[in-house]
């Protein structure tokens, strides 16, 4: 087969594998997907239908996205992220994922090293590889809640380092990197003139004392950051495939050169839906956050009843957590997850998918109804206490 090495080297996605295996079993308690199970608020769909009826969506938009949408994004960035922007600094993308992919294609040359905290979102790892970059993993400090190892990152910088890519709140750990740590990261980036690419997909889902901080709000970082955001999580708009990125005005035309060959522009109907999402009350976002907070507390309570199986760090954000498997058989997280699915009908995601320090962990999603969490943990209790 004539498959490029870039693509051939990408490992099979464990999440998709677990989904496939789950479908072979009936009535599985499913904690594998980082996808909100609630739907988008009705007013968003209504706005899309209105745009269709007005025949606004049959053509392409400009590749960077509808100007009126970018204008709303500029307001949102100022209000919620303390980022001063203008519409020439925004590209509307096909979810955060396409923004991240375009950003990496725009800045990584073959052989460039890209620092990733580990564990991290597996798609970032694959995107670095697709851009022919070389991922360099720096383990996070698990016992302190999977925070960044700033000294470790400093040591990992070499003359070949081009960028640092991170997501906060984190998929898979739920860690929220603090403003203090991100300011230290910015100092490293500025000292070595590195790019920082951020994935802020879970920006609104932070709990307890944690706050979301956008590194692009540091004025000195203006030229060194590409920040990627999405409507997927904030408004439960997963299938609408709509997000955006922010970068320095001079970088945008270059990133756009990577954006266009893959997409031409983001789906126009979804751009109108996103416009409505930003222009209306943001109450739904807080309701989602409160729902995830309560689901996180429930999942932690249930994990507390299985101390001989799991140790965990309480996630400060996102709707994901990353417990460590204390049992000997957890050393192979793939096998562990497949066995858990087969014997207990609970679908999780193997930690090994999320970088070298992910092994011996599994990822659990709590963006599911409470009954699903209860069913999954009732089954796990029966299985592990058998
Ligand atoms: C950290 C992170 N970034 C990006 C995405 C995908 O975002 P989008 O649907 O906006 O492409 C996900 C989805 O799970 C995610 O967890």
Image (tube, rainbow, N blue to C red):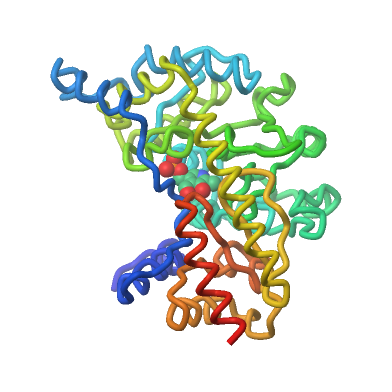
Q: Residue furthest right?
A: 151
124 in relation to 169, above or below: below
In the rendered view, tell whether residue 208 sits above or below residue 51. below
Q: How far from the left and from the top, in percent, is residue 64?
A: 38, 23
**Residue 58 percent coordinates (x, y):** 15, 24
Is 222 or 253 nearer to us in this picture? Answer: 222
Asked whether 186 or 146 is in front, the reply is 146
Residue 232: quarter of image: top left
| Quarter the C terminus occupies | bottom right
Query: Quick one: quadrant of the N terminus?
Result: bottom left
Q: Residue at x 57, y 53 (%)?
A: 320
Number of numbered discs present?
A: 0
149 vs 91, left or right, is right
Query: Considering depth in this image, is 254 or 283 the residue closer to the camera?
Result: 283
Q: Is residue 383 visible?
A: yes
Quadrant location of residue 92?
top left
In the picture provided, is 135 more to the left or to the right than 335? right
Front residue (pair 169, 386)? 386
Seen at 63% across and 85% down, the residue is: 329
Residue at left 39%, top 43%? Answer: 38
Residue 87 in picture, x, y percent from top left: 47, 14
The answer to whether residue 167 is left or right of residue 123 is: right
Residue at 51% over, 60% down: 373
Q: Is residue 102 visible?
A: no
In the drawing, does residue 196 fall left or right of residue 274?
A: right
x and y, in percent, of residue 220 in the image: 74, 22
């Amino acid at each position: 087969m004539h498959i490029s090495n870039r693509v051939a080297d990408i490992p099979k996605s464990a999440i998709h594998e677990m989904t496939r295996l789950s479908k072979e079993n009936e009535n599985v308690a499913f904690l594998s997907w980082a996808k909100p199970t609630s739907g988008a608020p009705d007013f968003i769909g209504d706005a899309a239908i209105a745009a269709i009826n007005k025949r606004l969506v049959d053509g392409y938009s400009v590749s960077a996205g509808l100007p009126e949408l970018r204008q709303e994004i500029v307001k949102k960035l100022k209000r919620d992220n303390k980022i001063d922007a203008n519409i020439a600094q925004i590209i509307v993308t096909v979810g955060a994922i396409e923004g991240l992919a375009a950003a990496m294609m725009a800045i990584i040359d073959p052989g460039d090293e890209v620092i990733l905290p580990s564990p991290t979102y597996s798609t970032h790892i694959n995107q670095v590889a697709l851009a022919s970059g070389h991922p360099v993993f720096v383990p996070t400090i698990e016992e302190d809640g999977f925070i960044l190892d700033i000294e470790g990152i400093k040591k990992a910088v070499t003359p070949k380092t081009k960028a640092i890519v991170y997501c906060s709140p984190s998929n898979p750990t739920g860690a929220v990197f603090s403003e203090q740590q991100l300011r230290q990261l910015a100092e490293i980036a500025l000292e070595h003139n590195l790019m920082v690419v951020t994935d802020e997909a879970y920006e609104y889902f932070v709990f307890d004392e944690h706050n979301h901080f956008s590194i692009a709000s540091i004025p000195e970082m203006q030229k060194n950051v590409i920040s990627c955001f999405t409507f997927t999580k904030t408004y439960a708009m997963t299938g609408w495939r709509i997000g955006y990125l922010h970068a320095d005005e001079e970088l945008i035309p270059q990133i756009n050169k990577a954006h266009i060959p893959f997409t031409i522009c983001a789906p126009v109907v979804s751009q109108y839906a996103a416009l409505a999402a930003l222009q209306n009350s943001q109450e739904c976002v807080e309701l989602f956050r409160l729902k995830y907070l309560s689901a996180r507390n429930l999942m932690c309570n249930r994990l507390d009843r299985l101390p001989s199986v799991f140790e965990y760090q309480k996630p400060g954000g996102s709707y994901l957590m990353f417990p460590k498997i204390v049992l000997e058989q957890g050393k192979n997280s793939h096998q562990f997850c497949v066995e858990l699915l087969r014997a207990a009908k609970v679908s999780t995601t193997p930690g090994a998918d999320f970088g070298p320090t992910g092994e011996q962990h599994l990822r659990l999603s709590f963006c599911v109804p409470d009954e699903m969490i209860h069913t999954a943990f009732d089954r796990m209790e029966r299985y592990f206490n058998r």
